[in-house]
Image (cartoon, rainbow, N blue to C red):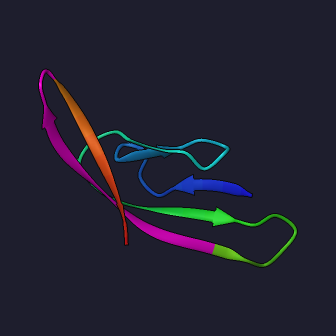
Amino acid sequence: MEYSVSDSSIATVKEDGTITGMKAGKATMICNIKDTNVIVSVEIKIMAVSHYTDKLYRIHLQ
């Protein structure tokens, strides 16, 4: 599978599909299954969360 994300300033995706939130916002994660015509897209929403001294991000798959 190949993964990509529509806006890398909002989130990034590793080769294994792990998503990392960069800042609050919405983006689309796209999964292309190699050697097929199957493409899956999922909207992701990153919400900023205050936590002590550092920012954390939650990912909501819709």
- Which quadrant would residue 61 be assigned to in this image? bottom left
Task: State which region is magenta.
Answer: 40-53
The N terminus: image quadrant: bottom right
The image shows residue 40, relative to residue 9, as above or below, that is below
The C terminus: image quadrant: bottom left
- For the residue pair 38 and 60, the one nearer the viewer reads as 60
Looking at the image, residue 34 sits to the left or right of residue 11; the answer is: right
Pinpoint residue 10: horizontal percent, then vertical percent.
34, 47
Pinpoint residue 13: horizontal percent, then vertical percent.
54, 46
Mostly what secondary structure, the magenta segment?
A: strand
Looking at the image, residue 13 sits to the left or right of residue 21; the answer is: right
Report if residue 28 lies within the magenta region: no
Pinpoint residue 8: horizontal percent, then vertical percent.
43, 45
Q: Residue at x 12, y 36 (%)?
A: 50
Q: Residue at x 61, y 73 (%)?
A: 40
Report if residue 42 lies within the magenta region: yes
The image shows residue 29, relative to residue 9, as above or below, that is below
- Which quadrant would residue 14 be assigned to in this image? top right
The image shows residue 7, relative to residue 31, as above or below, that is above
Q: Residue at x 29, y 49 (%)?
A: 58
Q: Residue at x 82, y 64 (%)?
A: 34
- For the residue pair 32 and 7, the one nearer the viewer reads as 32
